[in-house]
Amino acid sequence: MNCDVRLMKGNEAVAEAAVRCGCDGYFGYPITPQSEILETLMALRPWTTTGMQVVQAESEVAAINMVYGGASLGRRVMTSSSSPGISLMCEGLSYIAGASLPCLIINVQRGGPGLGTIQPSQGDYFQAVKGGGHGDYHCVVLAPDSVQEMYDFVAEGFDIAFKYRIPVMMLSDGMVGQMMEKVVLRENRPRKTDAEIVAECDSWALTGRHPNRTHNIITSLQLQAAEQEAVNLQLQAKYQAIQQNETRWDEYHTDDADVVLVAFGCSARICREVVDMARSEGLRVGLVRPITLWPFPSDRLGELAQQVQMLMTVELNAGQMVEDVRLAVNGQVPVCFYGRMGGVIFTPDEVLEQLKQHL
Amino acid sequence: MDVREIICEQNKVYSKSKILTDTTLHYCPGCSHGVVHKLIAEVIEELGIQQRTIGVTPVGCGVFAYNYFDIDMVEAAHGRACAVATGINRLAPERVVFTYQGDGDLSAIGTGETIHACNRGESIVVFYINNAIYGMTGGQMAPTTLCGMKTATTPDGRDPKLHGYPYKITEMLAQLEGVCYVTRQTVASAVYIRKAKRAIRRAFENALAGRGLSFVEIVATCNSGWKMSPVAANKWLVENMLPFYPLGDIKSVGE
Ligand SMILES: Cc1ncc(C[n+]2csc(CCOP(=O)(O)OP(=O)(O)O)c2C)c(N)n1
C-alpha cells in the first residue's frame, strides 16, 4: 500500500487523487478559488503516465458537455469549477442526470449571487442539493471538511457514480480548497482497460456497436409523456436506494448532548471547536456533520431531536440546509440558525456567543 | 401482373445501407435529412467502420438520428454536440466521431462549442445541415435565413436592420488551423447527391487518418417550413440558396 503523506492544498489534493484513482479525463475552465485543480493536473501531465486526458475547455458549458461525452463512453470523467461556473454547468448536469451517466463534479464554492466574491461560501447548497438544472433529478452531494476528504472523495465519488450511474457532486468551498493540510495519498488504482469498460458498461455505454448487441443510445429525450414518466419513476427508485444505502454523516459528542449543532464542510470544522469550547464551560453541546448533503441524514436528525432540547444549524449562507434540518426534526424541538454570507467566516467565539443567546 | 412478381430478388436495383435501421423516418416527405442520413450510412458501411463510429445527434429535426443509424449514438443538448464529440474523441481517439447538426444548433446556440472544437482540431467530422430555418420548432428564423425570407418569426421577411444578416460560418471556420477540410454540398438533385457523398467519404477518411476536423455543410430543404412542395423546395434552393451559399470545397489540407 502506498503511504505517501504530503502537505497540500485541497485543490491540489483533488488533482493528485484524480491521477491516482484511475480517472480517465478532466475537462475544466479556470475560476478562483479552484484553478489549482486544472493547473496541478497540467503540471502533473498524467497523459504521459496513466493516460488520463486533461483539456482546458472554452467555457464551463463546453466542459460539462465534454464530461457528458466522456461519461457516455463508460469512462471515469470529471470537472471542477466554482459557483458561477457551476451555474453554467447546470444544463449539462440535468442532461447527465436524465441520461443516467456517471461523473464527478467539484464545486469549490465562493460567495454569490452573481459574480459575488472569491472568498469561501456555502451559498450553493440549494443549487447542489435541490437541483440546479431543470427537471426532477438529484446528484449525490458529498461535502468534504478537510483536504484529506477532498482527496478521498474523488475515488469514493467515482464509486458511487458508477454504482448508481449518477452524477456525484463534491460540494467544497474556498476554504477547504485553498487551505493546506497533511494528506495521506491513499491507494493507487489503475485506469480501467478497454476490456474492463466493456465488461462493466457494455449494456449502456458507447463501447461501439458490435455483433453481439444492438446499438446503444444515450439520450434524455422521451416524446411520449408516459415514457418520460417511466424514466422518472426509474430515477426515483434509484434515488430511494441511494437514500437507503449511501447516507453518510459524522457525530461529535452527541451521546449526552442537550444541544446539537448541525454543520457541513468548513463550517463543521469551526463547529468542532465550538463544541470543545462549550464543553469546557460545562455546556453539553454536540455536532452532527452531514457528509452526504443529498441524501440527507434526516432519520438520524429526527431521532436526535427526541433526545436534545434544541438544534442549531450553522452555515456560511443565509440559511439553506436549515430547511432540511427543520423537515427532519419536524417541529419536535426548536431549530435555530446562524450564518454569515458574502465570504465572511464566523469565528468559534462568535458561534458560541450566538448559541448561548438561544439557551 | 402481380406486384410480387415485380418486387423480387432478380429485379433488385437498390437496397438501403445495413447501417440504417428499419425504423421509419419521422422526417417530412421531401426533407433533405433522410437523404443525408442515407449517404452517411453508406459511407460508414463502405469504409467498414460501424463498430468504430460514434454519432452525436443535435437538438433539432435530426435529434432522432440515433434511431436510424445502427451505430452507438449519443444525443447532445442544443448546440453542444461539438463539445460532446470532443469528450469522446479525447478519451477514445481510435473511434470515428461525427456530429450531425442543424443551422440553429450549430451556428446560433452552439457557435462557441463549434468554433473551439474546430480550433482545437478535434479529429471529428461535423455535418452542418443548413436549411435556413428552425425546422423542429415550427419554422422560425435561423442565423442562415436569407434576407427577405418569410419565417414564423419574420412574417414580413428577414429585414437585416431588425434581425441581422445571414452569415456563413463555414467560410469563417475555414480560417482555423485545426480544420483540415471544409466543403459545402447539397442534395437537391442526383448529381449533387453523388458529389455530396464523395465529400462525406473524404471527411470520414480524414478522421480515420487523424488529419484534423472535417466540416461538411449540406445546403438543405425544409419544404414544410418553407411551405413548398418537395419539388418546388429543391428548385427554390438551387435558385435562391446556392447563390448565397456557393457549393464546393473551401479548404482542403493534405491527403
Ligand atoms: C436550450 C434550448 N433552447 C431551445 C430549444 C428549442 N429548440 C429545439 S430545436 C430548435 C431549433 C432547431 O433548428 P435547427 O438546428 O436549424 O435544426 P432543424 O430542426 O431545422 O433541422 C430549438 C430552438 C431547446 N430544445 N433547447
Image (spheres, rainbow, N blue to C red):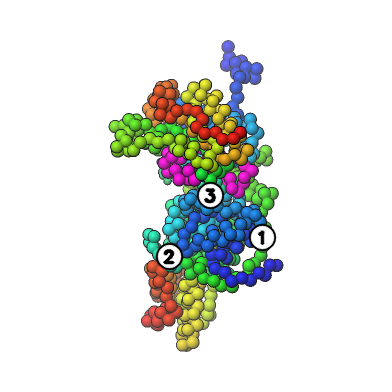
Q: Earlier in the sequence, mark 1 or mark 2?
A: 2
User: Of the numbered discs in the image, which one, if any, rests on residue A189?
Assistant: 1
Q: Which residues are magenta?
A: B88-117
> Could you say which disc has been placed on residue A66 in the image?
3
Front one among A247 and A168: A168
For marks 1 and 3 on the same chain, the one whose residue lies earlier in the sequence: 3
The answer to whether residue B103 is magenta is yes
Q: Badge 3 sits on which subunit?
A: A
Look at 39% across and 25% down and name the residue there. Answer: B240
Residue visible at 70% across and 67% down in the picture:
A1
Left or right placement of residue A242 versus residue A323 in this view: right
Say above or below: A349 vs A92. Answer: below
**Label 1 crowd (10 A; few <14 / some 14-19 / many >=20):** some
Amino acid type for the residue under numbered disc 3: Met
Q: Which mark is residue A118?
A: 2
Amino acid type assigned to the residue bearing label 2 in the image:
Ile
Magenta stretch prevailing secondary structure: helix
Q: Residues within 10 Å of mark 2 (few under 14, many from 20)?
A: some
Residue drawn at (41%, 33%), measured in percent from left and top?
A: B132
Q: CA distance from mark 1 to mark 2?
A: 34 Å
Subunit under mark 2: A
Regarding residue B88, the answer to whether it shows in the image is yes
Above or below, B14 against A223 in this view is: above
Q: Chain of mark 1?
A: A
